[in-house]
Amino acid sequence: MKTTEVLVIGGGPAGLSAALEAASRGSQVTLVDSDLQLGGQLIKQTHKFFGSEDERAGTRGYKIGELLFKELEGLKDCIDVHVNTTVLGYYKEDGVVSLSRGEEDYFRIKPERIVMSTGAMERLIPFPKNDLPGVYGAGAVQTLMNVYGVTPGKRVLMIGAGNIGLIVSYQLMQAGVDVAAVVEFMPKIGGYWVHAAKIRRLGVPILLRHTIVEALGEDVVSGAVIQAVGDKGLEGDPVRIDCDIICLAVGLTPTAELLWQAGCDMQFVPELCGYVPRRDAHMRTSQSHIWVAGDAAGIEEASSAMVEGRLAGLGAARSLGHVKDSDYDAGLASYWQRLSHLRAGEVGEKIRSGLEKCSCDAWEV
Amino acid sequence: MTDKERLFNSGILVESRPGAEEPPLSLWETKKNGLVVIECPQRIPCNPCASSCPTGAIIPFDDINDTPRIDYEKCIGCAKCVAICPGLACFVIDLTAGGEGKAVIKLPHEMLPRPEKGEEVSCLNRQGEAVAAGTVVAVTEPLKDRTVVVHVEVPRALMRDIRAVKVVKK
Ligand SMILES: Cc1cc2nc3c(=O)[nH]c(=O)nc-3n(C[C@H](O)[C@H](O)[C@H](O)COP(=O)(O)OP(=O)(O)OC[C@H]3O[C@@H](n4cnc5c(N)ncnc54)[C@H](O)[C@@H]3O)c2cc1C
Ligand code: SF4
Ligand code: SF4
């Protein structure tokens, strides 16, 4: 059976950063991702990122991915990369991980340390006919457009005015697709105001206090019915919108199955959008050889996912005896400084209060 | 929810507020190359406008969540902020350029097709309504990153409304 010092599960910004950090500190790393290419969400992000210049704000997401890939190239002797490879299960009893490459090729790995950076899954909302072809998650729409260069349809109704709904609406317009409207249940957009202004001035209505009532169509989506919502539920007349795509951008939830299987202490934290593992300041879970990073640890941003990945990679490398205490302390301090910088202010408040609920200084031994 | 709130809460600027203020008119009238107009009224963790401004006209932020504050005396209208801002929230408006009754707006543009110099484009207000025709006087790509800055001559009376342009298919 294959062995490895550090197995990193998921090659998005968090997992890539974890693998790079662990390898640059002298660990022998295996990085696996179920997708055909590494990069996770990052390769789909054609918009310029926010944040500070230290975290490469003003740079398009996929360009940040390219920088990580370049770094990976430099460390390729220490990082064994497997794409198109899904981790199927983790067997707590003997610490073995089972994987499949493609559909048929099953194998096992026995790692000494694991970093779980499996990212997030999209949420769906119930409404009649939400199973018609033409109802998409925003992630799928982004993958089609920005990875494969295929437009999903001609005219889209976007559900949800968080950053994802707003950004994907803008990207749809860049791809030449009409956006009929963005529908938002709350009395205020959830995403950044500037992202909303960007699509408003191109003529896209954002309908606050509205929701989708049903999808229309026999074999495929041919429209949708939306309606205003008030304090007592639906109000006003239902309105028919012509569209061939209904795109759901109603939130993400951490992909946590493997963490559950591994027996990590889990906790439901609404601010982090679902069940997340409890972790210490080193991003280590209650299972002493398992670390977590990125959206799997709570829905946040690529910028913070990359720093969490660094922390997890550093922690795993140290636990293997590769990192001197003084180097470790310096690394820990600098990464935490970056994280607290990213999470400062109003926008970070939700994350901060969520993290308070599931963090501990150190695990009791 | 008042109408004003409904508009603002859905991404439309309805009045000036911190992070979205106008330059003083007296300086604006005479400043060659124009002055920056920023519409970024929400505190968000973002600062490339300030950190890329070559003259310090966008006053360096104490906290990354600050909304931009501007020292208009220092602004040289270079439009670097226009090109880098990930929120497409920076514009430069030049009241000294263009013909009689006109102003030139330098605005960010990321849609295809790209406007071309000399072309007549449709000018859109904050709600995407076509409110005037404008003439493209220049198109630059300062950061070579596919965000272009379109310099468009518009009726001066609409300089407070026009915030985007659209290429009209012939
Ligand atoms: C439209 C949109 C706009 C965004 N804009 C910004 C922005 O401006 N700034 C910013 O900082 N962030 C932004 N983000 C957020 C950012 O993309 C995510 O927070 C970030 O990608 C999370 O990184 P991650 O590595 O944790 O997860 P992901 O990027 O989701 O990567 C997880 C990876 O794990 C793999 N995986 C999952 N399960 C398994 C398994 N069992 N076996 C093997 N592999 C597995 C997946 O294939 C995937 O590649 C945006 C996100 C979206 C959708
Ligand atoms: S136009 Fe140039 S000088 Fe003026 S604020 Fe923008 S970057 Fe600074
Ligand atoms: S770069 Fe743009 S979005 Fe970011 S703070 Fe400056 S004006 Fe606002």
Image (spheres, rainbow, N blue to C red):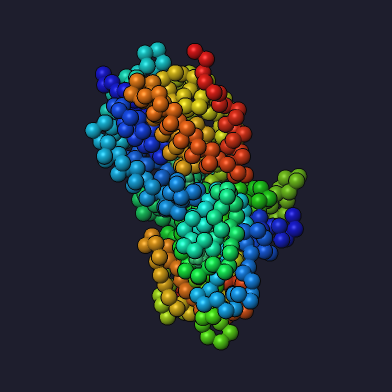
Question: In the rendered view of the protein, which quadrant contains the C terminus of chain B?
Answer: bottom left
Q: Is residue B29 above or below residue B100?
A: above
Residue at (60, 29) in percent of width and height: A356
Q: Of residues B4 and A235, which is closer to you in this image?
A: B4
Q: Could you say where residue B58 lies in the image, as x and y percent from the top left?
A: 55, 60
Number of numbered labels in the structure image: 0
Q: Of residues A235 and A186, which is closer to you in this image?
A: A186
Q: Quadrant of residue B103?
A: bottom right
Question: In the rendered view of the protein, which quadrant contains the N terminus of chain B?
Answer: bottom right
Residue at (43, 22) in percent of width and height: A290
Q: Could you say where residue A281 lies in the image, as x and y percent from the top left?
A: 50, 27
- A217 relative position to A83: left or right: right
- A94 relative position to A239: left or right: left
Q: Could you say where residue B155 lies in the image, as x and y percent from the top left?
A: 57, 80
User: Do we see residue B73 in this rendering?
Assistant: yes
Residue at (40, 38) in percent of width and height: A12
User: Do we see residue A15 in this rendering?
Assistant: no
Residue at (37, 37) in percent of width and height: A16
Q: Residue furthest left?
A: A77
Q: Could you say where residue A338 lies in the image, as x and y percent from the top left?
A: 49, 39
Q: Is residue A320 above or below residue A340?
A: above
Q: Is residue A161 above or below residue B37?
A: above
